[in-house]
Amino acid sequence: MILEKEIPSFYDWLTGDWQRAVLELIFFRRINDNPGAILSWLLSIGTLLLAALIVGFVFCAVRYGLTGVFVPFGRAIRRGVENLTNVSFARTWAIARLAIQESIRRRIMILVVLFMLILLMAGWFLDRGSENAAELYMTFVMWSTTILVLILTLFLSSFSLPTDFKNKTIYSVVTKPVRSSELVFGRILGIAIVGTAMLLFMAIASYFFVTSELNHSHLLFERDLTPISVEAGEQSDNAKRLVFKGETQLNSGHRHLVDVFADGTVNVGVVNGHTHRITSEKVNEQTRYVVHNEQGTLQARVPVYGKLDFRSPEGLDTDKGINVGDEWDYRSFIGAGDEAAIYRFTGLQQSTFPQTDGNFKNGLPVEMTLGVFRTHKGNIERRITASLSVRNPKTGLQAEVMTFSTEEFVTKYVAIPWTFDGTPQVVQRRGRTTQKTPDGREESVFYSVPDDATASQERNDAQFSRRRTFDLFKDFVTDKGEMEIWLQCVDRQQYIGMARSDLYLRAADGSVGWNFVKGFYGIWMRMLMLTAFGVLFSTFLSGPVAMISTVGVMVAGFSKAFMIEIGLNKVLGGGPFESLLRIMTQQNMVVDLPKSFSTTFVQSADNVYSMFMRLLGQAIPPLSDYSVYDGAVVKGFSIPSYWLMNHTIMTLAYAVPLFIVAYLILSNREVAKS
């Protein structure tokens, strides 16, 4: 699973480097890029409240004059605080129930019928025999559900209050003891309940649709198996001797290879990412095989990621590998020789990993999806060869475990045996850092891990040098659960690329059903955020205009990263004014503009524009961040709990200010004062 933007742990995301950010704020310096979610939210809310107070004070001063502004202004602040803090649940629920009834009258059940028709038609067109059938089906249900739910949210939230104004039903509401805050909150709550009910129905229908479509079995008869002859001199009582070999009957566009051993055990080959369990029984002196339902099509992998470093051709630690010229710099590459990609894992415990699970019997499960860059074709059918080694970070003990062949972007499954034979060596990790000299200057120095004394002691250990059999956790995992996996390219003039999430240890799988619920919860958070925006725009815009504005927010939310890049002037060719000047003067994007008044003017205009885009980018919801839920469910990865915690707080952090702004706007409309 590709993760271009790493999601930090809950505590790191919430706090960040807040101490440094506070000091920078006190001394009026530019705040660092990681002030933490709490400080960022408080600064944003404080700026919003300050702007609201200034605007309110100006309006009061215009209406009452500078001498009489303070009494009505203070009264307005007190009334606003009371309306926001003393919200009645009974009145709010009455407004929410009214919103639910209106939604039902607008025949939203048509959406249910439409969704069921889409699922029925999808059963005709989606290919169960596809190599990635699970991804195909999951992609379909996730995206179809997202589109339908967001369309429902757009219509209900954008037309809720404008329809009340148009039908004049709002007047019968505001004449009753209902606060504007309760009216806004009730609308958001009612629409959210309707959307949640629809999403719950779609989730249940989607889950049963996917599981029923992908679930299948095969037929296996004795005539499908070919006996394996016993060579002369072989022991016929060997329990693990292969006695039959064959294939299952065709189903869902594929067959499975079957091996039957003398002790009655049956191995089934993996096809399209799944296998089957086969049991046999004797019936009237004949063997009958029962092929059970598929296993492994739907997964919820629990990956254990490590920290990725690279080893340069000079043998020094670096943050990046070789750049082979790809525009997408997600992966770094290593060539043959001393170069290596080093994954350092922490907190490892043997009980975390499955002991006997499918492809990973009696070994530490490792999955990797690597990139390949060929400097020459050679034998194009021949795969690139790589080696995998393990290393103890404390002692420097390293041993090569295996060599394997890899293809570009094809997931490779290997298992590091719990015990294995290998040739030991002590490998030091060397890097370059800076330190201050006694006279205060900074100089570049080398460091080694482990230090030279420890490495020399290990080399001279006679007992160590004679060892050839190693225990993975005893010899290569430290008492703190630290271990390193080294990947190296074997083929000369060829390169292997990897990112942090391209290699991981696979812990015991999670629940597929629970992971499905987490994925739909990601859709629910997007729905709630758009509901808040739709209700906000509906407080002062007509229905169609409010819907268009909400659609604009949604489109901007899915492209927020690009807007932030514009705000930070990281786009090639400069901002819009500089780009226009380059088009008019036919200047290339990578060529510096000549120093002139026009260049200075357009770049100054772009700086002002970038400040505006930076502020706007911070206000726009990061809807693209929620796409990791869709990707995790589609690719079969378990969604971590800290993702849910981070994004739940993020959703509420946007919904609460939107509710406050919507209340302020509605409370100042004439209908709210009547």
Image: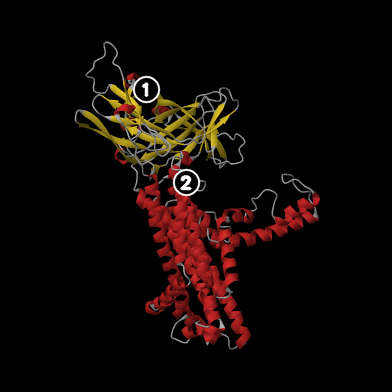
Q: Label 2, secondary structure: give it.
A: loop
Q: Colour scheme of this structure image?
A: secondary structure
In the figure, 284 relative to 195: above or below? Answer: above
Q: Nearer the viewer, residue 601 or 261?
A: 261
Q: Position of residue 204 (x, y in %)?
A: 38, 56
Q: Nearer the viewer, residue 445 or 292?
A: 292
In the figure, 227 relative to 72: above or below? Answer: above
Identified by mark 2, the residue type is Leu
Location of mark 2 (residue): 126
In screen coordinates, is 548 left or right of 95? Answer: right
Identified by mark 1, the residue type is Gly
Q: Label 1, secondary structure: give it.
A: loop
In the figure, 25 relative to 94: above or below? Answer: above
Q: Position of residue 75 (x, y in %)?
A: 50, 85
Residue drawn 53% across the image and 81% down it: 167
The residue positioned farthest toward the left in the image shown = 284
Q: Alpha-carbon neighbours of circle 1 within 10 Å: few (<14), some, or many (≥20)?
A: some
Q: Nearer the viewer, residue 314 or 49?
A: 49
The residue positioned farthest toward the top in the image shown = 232
In the figure, 487 relative to 536: above or below? Answer: above
Location of mark 1 (residue): 422
Residue drawn 60% across the image and 59% down it: 614
Determine the CA span between mark 1 and mark 2.
48 Å
Q: How many marks?
A: 2
Q: Alpha-carbon neighbours of circle 2 within 10 Å: few (<14), some, or many (≥20)?
A: some
